[in-house]
Amino acid sequence: MPLVDAAREVRECAYAPYSRFKVGAAVRGASGRIYQGCNVENVAYPEGTCAEAGAIALMVASGETELIEVAVIADSPSPVPPCGGCRQKLAEFGRADTPVLLATTGGVTLATTIGELLPGRFDISHMSGVE
């Protein structure tokens, strides 16, 4: 299944009663397995979960810690990029050259990479000397 189709499928499961803005995400682990996530809102807005974070959590819970491809889809006029926090989460588990496909439900797409979404990312190299 193409990754964007997996994201499109799980988007329908999003819990978005407040914004009505459903987002679906799918990541492909190094094993080739696809992990899906959708946004889950909460009446206390900061307590919600982004689709990308959900997909990453499922990947890690399944025993994988490396993603090799990402797709995110939403019903918007143009492709929606991940929020800043999710960009850092993607960077934790993917390389700078990991492909990211952003899509709309209407078929508009934007191909990018984790490195393009988060230049100058914070990573383990910044923590050298920390014990």
Image: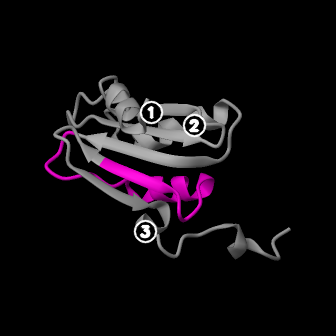
| Picture residue at 71% right of the left edge, 73% below the top | 125
Please tell me the numbered disc located at residue 46. Answer: none
Residue range corresponding to the magenta coloring: 75-102
Whether residues under marks 1 and 2 lie with C-beta atoms below 8 angstroms apart, the answer is: yes
- Counting the numbered discs, the total is 3
| Picture residue at 73% right of the left edge, 72% below the top | 127
- Whether residue 65 sits left or right of residue 12 in the image: it is right
Amino acid of disc 1: Gly
Whether residues under marks 3 and 2 lie with C-beta atoms below 8 angstroms apart, the answer is: no
Residue at the disc numbered 2: 57
Amino acid of disc 3: Glu
Amino acid of disc 2: Ala
**The one of 116 and 20 positioned closer to us in this rendering:** 116
Please tell me the numbered disc located at residue 116. Answer: 3
Q: Position of residue 58 (x, y in %)?
A: 57, 32
- Whether residue 128 sits left or right of residue 23 in the image: it is right
Residue at the disc numbered 1: 37
| Picture residue at 31% right of the left edge, 33% below the top | 43
Mark 1 or mark 3: whose residue is earlier in sequence: 1
| Picture residue at 52% right of the left edge, 57% below the top | 98
Q: Alpha-carbon distance for marks 1 and 2?
A: 8 Å
Mark 1 or mark 2: whose residue is earlier in sequence: 1
Q: Is residue 77 magenta?
A: yes
Mark 3 or mark 2: whose residue is earlier in sequence: 2
Q: Is residue 26 visible from the viewing direction of this image? A: yes
Mark 2 falls on what kind of element? helix
